[in-house]
Image (cartoon, helix red, strand yellow):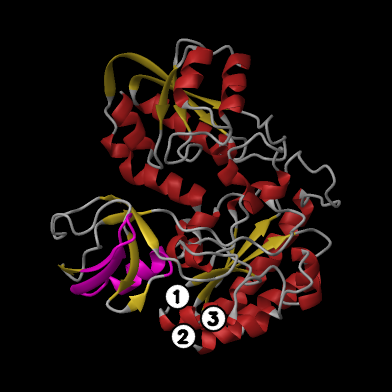
């Protein structure tokens, strides 16, 4: 684990062995602490990945009894070490954004992990998490350069430093363009995002930000523009409002002008609007060509288009008819509701004996301003199904509302939904056709 308080290396502990094909019996065991690999001190799990990329490894470990030994392992160069590590301590955010989702959660009602304000450059490299760079030290920069941790995902928000510091509520934040150039000059590419707060970093400020970032092309790989999201838990927080539909349309016009400029200059649109902006503005989701290779899919940019296009590619796999009548209810949030209803109607019209209905569940837990299905809680889904009078039926959950441990954000589980509604619950994937085939 990496000690964020002191920044010192304290090794990484093995949680379990997941692949012992090339690990000699008794050499590495759960509870061992990895101190170094091939003479390189191990600070965290990222070091284990980086330093174990060789074929021949000399691994210094400390046993539970305090004894230290070195074990030698030979493995294929394209294989991981084969161990699961105790998770690293997460670097926390030094910014204090007024729209931070962690600050907009009910106090003491969620599991502890949901209250961690992560701002960890390691997670940015490994998983595409956006970071502010406000807690990156000179030593961190040297490590980023040494290990070539590229690309990174950076929350820019504004290149006007006074506006950005206000946006982040972080007066200590360094000039962002200096930080970006520092990365780029050493070969680190970046994806960037701008969360637009009306009256703060839109209009002329957004125009400057887009142009400044475009000047760093091609090392700035993409710019995502996302509207601010707010929950009902804002007691004691400064006044922040959502973008209006008219503001959403103006943002899309501004983004489109920038895209046209970038296409003319670079043959690359560079700038991408979030799905929520098109929904907010009442405009259709663009075709796949708009998104290129979907550089910010995990940021909610292009998810709807990818979902709909995946259906078009796979719909011929659906049978012409089912042997007996079957009805399924697809649960979703407000944002995706109209799109899912269109697909459900098409499927019901083409697959005999299959009727698909869509139940749009409001987010009572977070408030009506939260409309994405991934934030629906078990409590929301139970209440929505009860209100619709749905019992003893087949219900299909959204693909992104459960974590890897099968928990909703409020820690309810699908069996609890079954118990409280009497419905049979199925988990969907991002492929609607694959989901339906697995059920029917």
Residue placed under numbered mark 3 in the picture: 139
Q: Which contiguous range is marked in magenta? A: 43-70
Location of the N terminus by quadrant is bottom left
Q: Is residue 406 above or below residue 239?
A: above
In terms of depth relative to the viewer, which is nearer, 306 or 151? 151
59 falls in the magenta region: yes
Instruction: Please report the residue visible at 34 percent of the width from the left and 25 percent of the height from the top.
Output: 351
Question: For mark 2, what is the residue?
Answer: 187
Q: What's the CA distance linking mark 2 and mark 3? A: 17 Å
- Label 3: element kind: helix
| Marks 3 and 1, the one that precedes in the sequence | 3
Give the distance between the C-alpha atoms of the residues marked 1 and 2, in whole angstroms.
8 Å
First in residue order: circle 1 vs circle 2? 1
Give x and y (percent) for residue 251.
71, 61
Single out the mark in the foreground, 2 or 3.
3
Residue nearest the viewer, comparing 41 with 380: 41
Numbered disc 1: secondary structure: loop
């Amino acid at each position: 684990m990496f000690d964020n308080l002191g920044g010192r290396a304290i090794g990484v502990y093995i949680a379990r062995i997941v692949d012992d094909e090339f690990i000699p019996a008794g050499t590495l065991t759960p509870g061992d602490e990895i101190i170094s690999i091939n003479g390189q001190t191990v600070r965290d799990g990222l070091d284990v990945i980086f330093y174990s990329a060789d074929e021949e490894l000399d691994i210094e470990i400390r046993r539970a009894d305090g004894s230290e030994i070195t074990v030698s392992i030979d493995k294929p160069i394209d294989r991981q070490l084969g161990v699961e590590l105790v998770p690293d301590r997460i670097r926390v955010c030094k910014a204090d954004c007024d729209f931070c989702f962690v600050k907009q959660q009910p106090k003491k009602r969620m599991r502890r992990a949901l209250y961690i304000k992560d701002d960890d450059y390691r997670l940015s490299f490994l998983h595409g998490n956006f970071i502010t760079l406000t807690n990156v030290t000179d030593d961190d920069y040297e490590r980023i350069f040494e290990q070539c941790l590229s690309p990174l995902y950076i929350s820019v928000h504004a290149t006007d430093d006074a506006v950005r510091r206000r946006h982040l509520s972080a007066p200590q934040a360094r000039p962002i363009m200096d930080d970006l150039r520092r990365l780029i000059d050493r070969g680190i590419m970046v994806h960037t995002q701008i969360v637009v707060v009306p009256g703060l970093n839109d209009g002329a400020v957004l125009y400057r930000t887009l142009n400044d970032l475009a000047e760093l092309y091609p090392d700035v790989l993409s710019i995502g523009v996302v509207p601010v999201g707010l929950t009902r838990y804002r007691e004691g927080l400064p006044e922040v409002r959502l973008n209006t539909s008219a503001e959403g349309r103006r943002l899309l016009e501004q983004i489109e002008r920038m895209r046209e400029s970038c296409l003319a200059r670079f043959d690359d649109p560079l700038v991408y609007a979030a799905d929520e902006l098109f929904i907010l503005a009442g405009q259709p989701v663009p075709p796949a060509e708009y998104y290129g290779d979907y550089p910010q899919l995990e940021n909610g940019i292009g998810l709807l288009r990818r979902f709909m296009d995946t259906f078009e590619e796979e719909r011929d796999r659906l049978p012409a008819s089912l042997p007996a009548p079957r009805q399924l209810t697809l649960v979703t949030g407000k944002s995706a509701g109209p799109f899912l209803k269109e697909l459900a109607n098409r499927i019901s019209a083409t697959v005999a004996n299959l009727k698909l209905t869509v139940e749009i569940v409001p987010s009572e837990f977070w408030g009506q301003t939260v409309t994405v299905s991934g934030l629906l809680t078990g409590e929301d889904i139970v209440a929505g199904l009860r209100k619709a009078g749905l019992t003893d039926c087949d219900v299909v959950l959204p693909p992104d509302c459960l974590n890897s441990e099968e928990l909703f954000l409020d820690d309810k589980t699908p069996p609890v939904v079954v118990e409280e509604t009497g419905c049979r619950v199925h988990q969907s994937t991002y492929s609607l056709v694959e989901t339906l085939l697995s059920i029917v």
